[in-house]
Image (cartoon, helix red, strand yellow):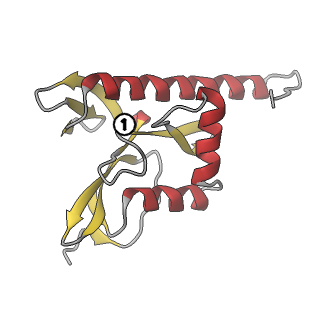
């Protein structure tokens, strides 16, 4: 196995993208992050689930929280963790259970433009990734993730004010 292969990975604000790749008969994950690129010998959803647990929540709780905000939509962005009150949100390109699904960090996206194949996403590190995902679809995912970010930031603002905060449960 090449040197840039690892058995585990915990997502953070340094994580830009989790992309499934075929390795022999298995699905591994190409991780692009702020500092490098590596291959994790696990599926993207496995990495996401383990990251949520390591960072104090579960994938199911993160999904439930997103469903409370959006209703019962498909392909919801999720909050993997919070760092100093800022939500670390990842958006899926397909159904989260699809072997083709790529998870992209909202914080990592600099630009999205249409292409013949689908769209090109420019990451914060100026790396461009062309995806076979329709521009309209990824734009909707980006908007949903941005709305979820704004929602959590508004909740954070209410919590940090002097007046008591009563969440709408």
Tell me the residue that label 1 is attached to. 108
In the image as oriented, which residue stretches furthest toward the left? 116
Instruction: Name the residue: 20% across, 78% down.
Output: 1
Image quadrant where residue 130 sits: top left
Q: Is residue 6 visible?
A: yes
Image quadrant where residue 138 sits: top left
Q: Nearer the viewer, residue 115 or 94?
A: 94
Residue 114 picture location, percent across and down? 19, 23
Relative to residue 62, is residue 127 drawn left or right? Answer: left
Q: Nearer the viewer, residue 39 or 160?
A: 39
Q: Nearer the viewer, residue 119 or 5?
A: 119
In the image as oriented, which residue stretches furthest toward the bottom? 1
Q: Is residue 83 visible?
A: no
Residue 102 picture location, percent across and down? 33, 46
**Is 59 rendered above or below residue 108?**
below
Relative to residue 74, is residue 119 drawn left or right? Answer: left
Instruction: Name the residue: 39% across, 23% down.
Output: 140
């Amino acid at each position: 196995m090449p040197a840039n292969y690892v058995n585990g990975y915990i997502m953070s604000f340094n994580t830009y993208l989790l992309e499934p790749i075929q390795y022999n008969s298995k699905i591994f994950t190409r991780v692009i992050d702020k500092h490098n690129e590596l291959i994790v010998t696990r599926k993207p959803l496995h990495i996401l689930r383990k990251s949520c647990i390591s960072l104090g929540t579960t994938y199911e709780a993160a999904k439930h929280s997103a469903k409370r905000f959006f209703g019962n939509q498909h392909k919801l962005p999720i909050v993997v963790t919070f760092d100093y009150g800022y939500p670390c949100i990842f958006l899926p390109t397909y159904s989260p259970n699809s072997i083709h699904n790529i998870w992209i960090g909202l914080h990592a996206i600099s630009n999205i433009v249409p292409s013949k194949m689908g769209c090109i996403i420019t990451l914060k590190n100026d790396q461009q990734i062309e995806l076979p995902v329709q521009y309209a679809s990824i734009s909707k995912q980006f908007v949903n993730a941005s709305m979820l970010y704004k929602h959590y930031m508004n909740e954070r603002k209410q919590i940090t004010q002097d007046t008591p905060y009563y969440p709408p449960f």
